[in-house]
Image (spheres, rainbow, N blue to C red):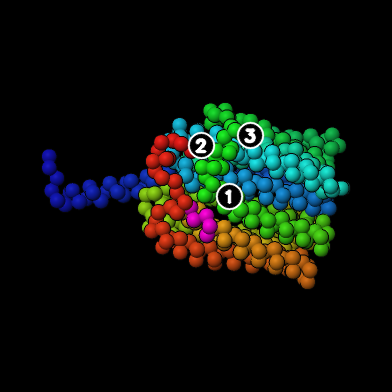
Amino acid sequence: MLLDTGQAASVGRRRPTAATWRLIRQACQRLSWGVADQGMSSLSNFAVNIYVARTLGAVQYGAFALAYVTYGFALNASRGLATDPLLVRFSGTDIPTWRRAITRCTGTAVTVGLTGGAIILTIAALLSGTVRLAFLALGLTLPALTLQDSWRYSFFALGRGRLAFINDTVWLVVLIPALVLLRKTGHADVFWFVFAWGAAAGVAAAIGPLQARTVPRLSGAWEWLYRHRDLGPRYMAEGTASSTGGLLRNYGVGFILGLAAVGYVQAATTLMGPFMVIYFGMGLVALPEAARILRRSPRHLPHFCLLVSGGLCILALAWGVVLLVALPRGLGQLMLGNIWKPTYPLVLPTTIGIIGSCAATGAGAGLHALGAARRSLGVMVISQTVVVVFSIAGAAFGGVVWAMAGSAVGSWVGALIGWRQLRAAMRESGGTPVGAVSRSTTSAGRP
């Protein structure tokens, strides 16, 4: 039976609406897995931070903090060279293409871990005391840490966040009894805590090939780097610039104010852990979602980026208020023990800085989806330069509170410049990814 004109128009309106809701529902499912997985990953990091802070005190926690930010530096280098190009160019591809890509991607991550581990072990040989022990443990376990992280992002590129969640759950399930065992057996020092944390990640990394049904190829690392040479080095520079800001800030604070001050900075960051679950969870899915939106409807990309940043800013502000109110009422002692009082003044500048990072997140996802690596790199270099200069100057002239205030200024500088660069990149590209590979290459399955 033929439909009249009004009925046909009605059906035509319903079909796009149904398709739109289906896409929204799928995106929400991916987001929920991103938050759940990041919750599991952050819980393992949060557990180590709280356990070390309560068990070892400010000085050994300061040594742990230096190793932790160094780990973040290496991890950002691995993501820039390995998983960021994967997310930009192979999000939502078919499984055979995805498997061919991740064998080289994960092989690249292991190569970065081996190289970084060797450098860290060399540095450890030149150090002494608790810092040497923390760096020694990190150098031994870094390849496992970078590989485990690459499996997580690989699963999100395919849109199967549940696999990443399972992998991070394995890490946490192995880690918790290991930490308890160390304390019971009298091995409660910074070396064994860092080593247990990295070794537990190694167990999870070993599960990855069973989930993906493929194994990392170290021999494919150079091919991966060559094929994505327009993105990888810039993303690595961007990621390492991001972590360099925190690295130099902590090193500078430690040099000027001592290891205990570094411990207070790390403790303030750790207090934001519950919110950071959502922040990093959104980060896991924001880039793949932005890449999908760009392919389907480029004009909606800025709206998506605004939604991401706006939602995160509101949640960060809410959690900061909770901390300011609840810490003096018993939460501080419960979470951090005796170091909560010198940490409390850092909560406000830390919250302001993280809100600035949230404001920049949407713009960063849009720039990465567009493949505008040169622009996103410029944003990161400028903002982190401000972080380093202002935080070290603050530490020298006003103490640790002013150091964190300097970091907050850098975060907001990055947010303002990032949105300006996203607008310019959208205008320049007309909605076409600047650094994208040709469709023929992707469809042919040659990662």
Q: Which residue is mark 2?
A: 101
- Residue at 83% from the left image edge and 44% from the top image edge: 125
Q: Is residue 156 magenta?
A: no
Q: Quadrant of the N terminus?
A: top left
Residue 11 visible (yes or no): yes
Work out whether residue 93 or residue 437 is closer to the camera in this orientation and state it: 437
Q: Main secondary structure of the magenta part?
A: helix
In this picture, residue 430 sits left or right of residue 63: left
Viewer-proximal residue, 300 or 334? Answer: 300
Which range is magenta? 371-375
Marked residue nearer the N-terminal end (2 or 1): 2
Q: Which mark is residue 205?
A: 3
**Residue identifier under label 1:** 233
Q: Amino acid at mark 2?
A: Ala
The CA distance from mark 2 to mark 3 is 17 Å
Q: Examine the image and state in which quarter residue 407 appears.
A: bottom right
Asked which secondary structure carries label 1, the reply is helix
Regarding mark 3 in the picture, which secondary structure is present there?
helix
Mark 2 and mark 1 in contact? Answer it, CB < 8 Å: no
Comes first in the chain, label 3 or label 1: 3
